[in-house]
Each structure stands twice: as C-alpha cells, then as structure tokens.
Image: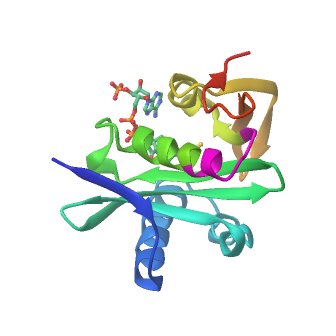
Amino acid sequence: MKIIIREVETSEEMEAAQAIRFEVFVKEQNVPPLLEKDPDDEKAMHVIALKEGLIIGTGRLLILGNIAKIGRIAVIHSERHRGVGTAIVKKLIEIAVQRGIREIFLHAQIPIVPFYALLGFVPQGPVFQEAGIPHRRMKMKFQNNDDEPIIA
Ligand SMILES: CC(C)(COP(=O)(O)OP(=O)(O)OC[C@H]1O[C@@H](n2cnc3c(N)ncnc32)[C@H](O)[C@@H]1OP(=O)(O)O)[C@@H](O)C(=O)NCCC(=O)NCCS
C-alpha cells in the first residue's frame, strides 16, 4: 500500500492532523489538551501521512534559527509498525536539511527513544518530565553541506 508523506496544504488537512494528535496524545496518553495544541503550531511546518487519501499520521518541524525541533509525531493505532512513523520523521529531516538546518533535536518519550535512535538521533542529558510524561532530549547533527547525520 503506497503511503504519501507531504506538507499540510489546507486548513482541513491541518484539522485532520490535529484530530489524530488529539486521539493519540490527549485520549491515549492523557496529555492536557491545552498543552497538546500549543502556540508553536502557528510557527511550525506540519506534515501528514496519507493512505488511500486518508490521513493516518502527522508530525511537525519547528525552525529555531539554524536548528530545528521535531515534535508531535503521531500515527493512528491501527497503522503502527508499518514504517509510517519512520517515513514522517525522515520527511521532516529532509525538509530541515533542504533549509540548511545543521542540527535537529526532539523530546522523546522514554519508551520511544529506540524508535528515534533507529533514525540516527542520539540521547542527550537527563530524563525530564513534560506533560507528566518522562522524556529525554535527542539530537542529530549534520556535516556542512552534507545530509549524512553524525552519530556522536
Ligand atoms: C511512535 C510512533 C509515531 C511510531 O510510529 P510507527 O509508524 O509505529 O513506527 P515505525 O513502524 O516506523 O517503527 C519503526 C521501528 O521503530 C521502533 N518503534 C516503533 N514504535 C516503537 C515504540 N512505541 N517503542 C519502541 N520502539 C518502537 C520499532 O523498532 C519499529 O520497528 P518494528 O515495527 O519492526 O518493531 C507511534 O507508535 C505513535 O504514534 N505513538 C504514539 C505517539 C507517540 O508516542 N509519539 C512520539 C512522542 S515522543
């Protein structure tokens, strides 16, 4: 089944992406709705995963000068473990690299650290709480003019 990952193009697509985030983070993980939908949504770029025209996953990239933050990666429950989450993060990395970003970081929920590690992110620093969930910062650095991550 072909999965298409692309940037959100319409307000309807943004609403559908936010509905998935509500289902996953608020209903499944008990994150408070006011924390889930934060002011960074206005500034971030958002991508969606489409399967037969249906939105099944989403994620966002927040550019902060010459670094960027990946967040809100969510795939509907019935479509997990089929590579959709990986494809979303890879697309966000690609967008960041095209924009000349040299370093990407994210806040990974502790059980999800292995998912991001498979993509080349490296854990940094101590465990901390965010939205009542233990997290760890992870980062990926790029060489100058080269999109190969430095694993270090
Ligand atoms: C995390 C999430 C986005 C992964 O999406 P996905 O489409 O299932 O991911 P992939 O199929 O690309 O996973 C690739 C590999 O990463 C690892 N992985 C994926 N999800 C994992 C998890 N929950 N825990 C540990 N490793 C995981 C596995 O090795 C997996 O390979 P496998 O399916 O052969 O076991 C999805 O589980 C999700 O939406 N979870 C709820 C929201 C969330 O926690 N988001 C991350 C916040 S930091």
**Residue occupying the point 57% across, 24% down:** 117
| Camera-side residue of 73 and 23 | 73
Q: Is residue 95 left or right of residue 125?
A: left
| Camera-side residue of 44 and 145 | 145
Q: Is residue 99 above or below residue 44?
A: above
Q: Is residue 86 left or right of residue 36?
A: left
Q: Is residue 72 above or below residue 14?
A: above
97 falls in the magenta region:
yes
46 falls in the magenta region:
no
Q: Is residue 93 left or right of residue 55?
A: right
Q: Is residue 100 above or below residue 36?
A: above
Q: Is residue 10 left or right of residue 112?
A: left
| Camera-side residue of 123 and 23 | 123
**Residue occupying the point 73% across, 68% down:** 40
Q: Quadrant of ligand 1?
A: top left
x, y percent for residue 44: 66, 66
**Residue occupying the point 79% across, 25% down:** 124
Q: In this view, which residue lies farthest toward the top?
A: 152
Q: In this view, which residue lies farthest toward the front?
A: 145
Q: In this view, which residue lies farthest toward the bottom?
A: 11
x, y percent for residue 103: 75, 38
* Figure label count: 0
x, y percent for residue 43: 71, 71
x, y percent for residue 14: 48, 75
Q: Is residue 27 above or below residue 2?
A: below
**Residue occupying the point 74% across, 15% down:** 152
The image quarter containing residue 34 is: bottom right
Write the start and end of the magenta stretch as one range.
95-104
